[in-house]
Amino acid sequence: MIQHPMTLTGPKEDAGDPAVVVATRPKTKRPPLYKVLLLNDDYTPMEFVVAVLERFFGMSHAQAFEIMLTVHKKGLAVVGVFSHEIAETKVAQVMDFARRHQHPLQCTMEKE
Ligand code: TYC
């Protein structure tokens, strides 16, 4: 017996009917974010850390002083959250600035 083409995949299947448009989910995956962390040490002067936070993270003096004290007391703090490329740049800028001033200040990044 010859089967009608419509019954080959069953009535619920889309057998390539050009009139059928299937809704697509817009897959706009946001890029992962990275936390930039500042680490405490016993030697970097407090005022240098404040200057770093003002210069590279756009903080006011009061904000920068507050975050510096958090790092000093707790051992580390998140100083910003950025895309991978921006986070890498911030870390490199801080590490270079600290190295040029011969301070052991450490700055790292981690995926949020
Ligand atoms: N602990 C340092 C001091 O007593 C100050 C300091 C704060 C150093 C924050 C690093 O990320 C830092 N001079």
Image (tube, rainbow, N blue to C red):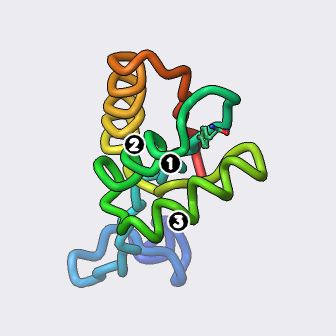
Q: Nearer the viewer, residue 21 or 33?
A: 33
Residue 11 position, x and y percent, is 52, 83
Provide the residue designation for mark 2.
Answer: 87
Label 1: how many residues lie within 10 Å, few (<14), some (14-19) or many (20+)?
Answer: many
> Which residue is located at x 47 percent, y 51 percent?
32
Q: Is mark 3 within 8 Å of ligand 1?
A: no
Residue shown at the point (50%, 67%) measured from the top left = 8
- Name the residue carrying label 1: 34
Distance between mark 1 and mark 3 Cα atoms? 65 Å
The picture places residue 29, in percent across and down from the top left corner, at 41, 60
Quadrant assignment, res 94: top left
Nearer to me, 20 or 71: 71
Circle on res. 1: 3
Residue type at numbered disc 2: Ala
* Crowd tier of the residue under label 2, counting other residues whose Cα lies within 10 Å: few below 14, some 14–19, many 20 or above: many
| In the depicted structure, whether residue 74 falls above or below residue 26 | above
Q: Given contact means CB atoms under 8 Å apart, are the residues at marks 2 and 3 in contact?
A: no
Q: Are marks 1 and 2 in contact (CB under 8 Å)?
A: yes
Instruction: Check the image and report above or below for 80 versus 49.
Output: below
Q: Nearer the viewer, mark 1 or mark 3?
A: 1
- Which structural element holds mark 1? strand
Q: Residue at x 42, y 76 (%)?
A: 6
Relative placement, left or right, of 93 versus 37 is: left
- What is the x, y in percent for residue 26? 35, 72
Q: Secondary structure at mark 2?
A: helix
Q: Residue at x 52, y 68 (%)?
A: 9
Quadrant of the rendered structure where residue 88 is?
top left
89 to 13, vertically: above or below = above
Compare marks 1 and 3 and give the one earlier in the sequence.
3
